[in-house]
Image (tube, rainbow, N blue to C red):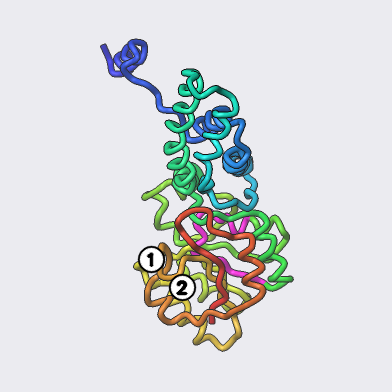
Amino acid sequence: MNKKQLIKKLRKNKKIVKKPSYIERMKKYRKIFSDFPAIIFLVNNILEADRLLRSNQLPQDLPELILPDNIQDEIFQFVNNQYSMNDREGDKVWNKYVDQLPILDKDLRSFRDYLEAEYGMWAYISAPFTNGIAKYLNGKKALEVMAGNGYISKGLCDARADVICTDSMSWQKENETGHHLVTNIEKLDANAAFDKYKHEIDVVIMCWSPDGVDIDWQLLQKIREYNKDIQLIVIGEKYGATDSKSFWDNAKIINSDIANELNKHHRPFDLIKDQLYFVN
């Protein structure tokens, strides 16, 4: 018996159970918790983001994917309203909900992991966010470095902004990211891209430069040394999941109402608190 036949036989004997996919689990939660609008709101946001990404569109803004603090109280009240205190059926319904809640909570918090694995999307980039950046550019030419799959540049192109998209592509063999390019990307690392295009551009966009690698600090020094006023837009988590310590130690962050407006479309939805910064 070959391996394929063995797996088929084991599945038939129910010794191997296929685990539902992330999206299948979300659809299951939507059925289980159909009477709880706060949960349905979160699940529907995930399902809609997935639908848009699967159709090669940028998703909409996300809410914070955390269950309300009072959700167990709400469920308890709901069950009490449906069943009498000594009704065993009510106990079964209550157990069904509370057994699923921690699993749902874990899956909500794992949405970024799903995006990374399924779409190679590390920073969550929404259409309203890139539309806001395009409006800020207002005809200025931008260079995106370390673009990954190119989600920001795609959104800017969709909004008819003038952007050059570049990435070293050095990670393509290491993870899923390189399998999901969404726009044309020129194979250049950040420093080489700046050297090539610095005469043409007004803005550099750098999103989620890897932590522990100081190429972001090298790039910032190049921008400062060049005899042209080029604005650096950084999207990342300060002293957190992105960018080197050297970069954050030396970056001069500009407090800007424009940045605050743009960040209304880039709010944290999980434990990573990244945002957009204007840096000199």
Q: Quadrant of the N terminus?
A: top left
Q: CA distance from mark 1 to mark 2?
A: 17 Å
Task: Name the residue located 56 percent from the left edge and 34 percent from the top edge.
Answer: 77
Q: Quadrant of the C terminus?
A: bottom right
Q: Residue furthest front?
A: 85
- Residue 156: x, y in percent? 66, 60
Q: Quadrant of residue 204?
A: bottom right
- Identity, as a three-letter code, of the amino acid under mark 2: Asn
- Residue 49: x, y in percent? 60, 44
Task: Name the residue located 49 percent from the left edge and 65 percent from the top edge.
Answer: 236
Question: Judging from the image, what secondary structure is the residue with disc 2 in?
Answer: helix
- Residue 206: x, y in percent? 52, 68
Which residue corresponds to mark 2? 191
Task: Name the residue located 43 percent from the left edge and 76 percent from the top edge.
Answer: 248
What residue span does the magenta drawing correspond to? 141-154
Disc on res. 211:
1
Tell whether position 210 is magenta: no
Q: Nearer the viewer, residue 178 or 136?
A: 136
Tell whether position 149 is magenta: yes
Q: Nearer the viewer, residue 183 or 18?
A: 18
- Identity, as a three-letter code, of the amino acid under mark 1: Asp
Residue 126 as seen in the image, left or right of residue 20 = right
